[in-house]
Amino acid sequence: MTMTFPRTFIWGSATAAAQVEGAGHEGGKEDSIWDAFARVPGAIANGDNLEVAVDHYHRYAEDVAIMKRIGLDSYRFSTSWARVVPGDREPNREGLDFYSRLVDELLGAGILPWLTLYHWDLPQALEEKGGWANRDTAQRFADYAETVYGTLGDRVKNWTTFNEPFCSSLLGYASGVHAPGRQNPRDAVAAIHHQHLAHGLAVNRLRELGAEQIGITLNLSNAIPLDENDPVDVEAARRFDVLQNRVFLEPIVTGAYAEDTLSDLEQFGLREVIQPGDLDIIGTKIDFLGVNHYHDDQVSGHPDDSGTDGHSGATERDIQSCWIGSEYITFPTRNLPRTAMNWEVNPSGLHKLLVRLGREYPNMPPLFVTENGSAYEDVVSEDGAVHDTEREKYIVDHVQAVSDAIADGADVRGYFVWSLLDNFEWSWGYDKRFGIVRVDYDTQERRVKDSGLAYSRIIASAKSGG
């Protein structure tokens, strides 16, 4: 098959501060909720922590050189709120200077900085004041956004407010598999709304300051009923769609929560946390939507333990369902290939999702696939290479799906593979490798995998029109 992309299409890769930076308490940085969570017994596989990670804080120049060698147009990274405003006090000049050096290094290599303000690392000091269940955190986030813009706004043009609020609300406050590890559905619903409000406040603040391109990144899926003629399965798919997609997407692109969303979540206080004027702020126009997608989901309302939702993580702690109010839904297997995360591989699902977004939401801004990738148990071979054939195929097939979606009318303008580097994979610690660049966690040696070389060839071919 032929892949065709616009000349202006952006090719990138992505990381997150907490997963790669290390320097966990260096340069003025203090605890984030993930630093604190890593000290909870059984929360993280092997008792791993974020103190060193893959040392991007000290090795960013080497990493940027690798990006340039691969041929990336853009690097999507996040700033750590706990590094920029440690302990919820004053801005930390040393932390801001690190990001300034990183941005300069990227620009010097001809690579576009794509900045995410929140990739889950809330300062622990704010969690102790209520975290995202506290409405005041939304205002603190807007202040933090202004602080970052004050240092980087002269050079950074692309601003993402949040990465995957599904995870930082429902997995962090309902299931407890992610930091801060709470298991309170009402807190989770408050977190959803307050993160939406924080997004809208930050968009308005950044716009006033002169930011050029502002958006948000959501992890979205397809809700596929096991039996389209079974009303129980159809209702299960609707409920999944609300919690995975629509409660996050619709307030931002339509300026409202749908009635079924409000009804489903009324028992957990959604209507109670919405104040007059909130939805006008939340629905402020954005310039792009980032779409993170790894797999889609077949759903049933009947008991079935043949598959999972993929959100159980590696924790040894007791966790709860993230499907609040809909805990009965199940995820029957489709007998597709699976990654090391036990996620089904279905590239056509990405095509379906991208086309659906534009068709169902007329006001949808341009789309960027801001994360797409896979974890496999790859190793260094005797020849010194990493022959990660499964990841290579995954990337090629999903890039093809993006090309097909564009051909079918989806306004997709960029693709970022996850992840540039093997890194700290949340509750899985260092047990799962997503990188197109292998990292030896003992020596910090970087080694471009075959998948990274394949991605480099895809980029070169697309740029040559081949």
Image (tube, grey):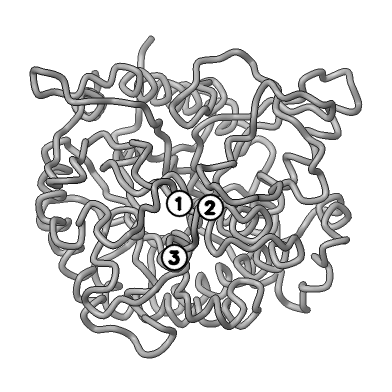
Q: Earlier in the sequence, mark 3 or mark 2?
A: 3
Q: Which amino acid lies under the numbered mark 1 shown in the image of this protein? A: Ile
Residue 337 place in picture, x, y as percent = 50, 16
Q: Is residue 358 visible?
A: no
User: Which quarter of the figure has residue 30?
Assistant: bottom left
**Local crowd size for mark 3, using a 10 Å CA cut-off: few (<14), some (14–19), many (≥20):** many
Farthest residue toward the front?
41
Front residue of this view, candidates 191 and 201: 191
Q: CA distance from mark 2 to mark 1?
A: 20 Å
Q: Is residue 369 visible?
A: yes
User: Which quarter of the figure has residue 310?
Assistant: top right
Farthest residue toward the bottom?
90
Q: CA distance from mark 3 to mark 2?
A: 12 Å
- Reply above or below: 30 against 227: below
| Residue, disc 1 | 44
| Residue, disc 2 | 164
Front residue of this view, candidates 71 and 404: 71
Relative placement, left or right, of 364 versus 419 is right
Q: Which mark is residue 121?
A: 3
Front residue of this view, candidates 20 and 396: 20
